[in-house]
Amino acid sequence: MTQKLTAIIEKENDGYVSLCPELDIASQGDTIEQARDNLKEALELFFETASPEEIKRRLHGDIFVTQVEVAVG
């Protein structure tokens, strides 16, 4: 069984940080691909070891990723 989750990847200093907001699990890597792959591994380890109760408690509902335009200055 598979589940689609959100991966937000952001440049930070010389590397990249990846976050899954549905579970609040993060990872990092030297490249975008490495950060994504490391997040995927962290998520798979979480699902392998977490109890059904912990998964239910941590799994947030719908996540919406968008951009907003704001006035600056």
Image (tube, rainbow, N blue to C red):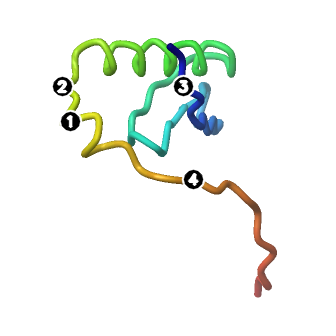
Please name which of the two marks, 2 or 4, marks the residue nearer to the observer: 2
Residue type, mark 3 in image: Gln
Q: Which residue is mark 4?
A: 63
Closer-to-camera residue (39/71): 39
Name the outermost residue toward the front.
1
* Image: 59 above or below 43: below
Q: CA distance from mark 3 to mark 4?
A: 14 Å
Q: Tell me what residue is drawn at x 73 percent, y 59 percent.
A: 66
Q: Are marks 2 and 1 in contact (CB under 8 Å)?
A: yes
Pointer 3 local density, CA inside 10 Å: few below 14, some 14–19, many at least 20: few
Q: Which residue is mark 3?
A: 3
Sooner in the amino-acid sequence: mark 3 or mark 1:
3
The quarter of the image holding the C terminus is: bottom right
Q: CA distance from mark 3 to mark 1?
A: 16 Å
Q: Tell me what residue is drawn at x 77 percent, y 80 percent.
A: 70
Pointer 1 local density, CA inside 10 Å: few below 14, some 14–19, many at least 20: few
Give the percent coordinates (x, y) of residue 32.
Answer: 68, 22
Q: Which residue is mark 2?
A: 51
Pointer 2 local density, CA inside 10 Å: few below 14, some 14–19, many at least 20: few
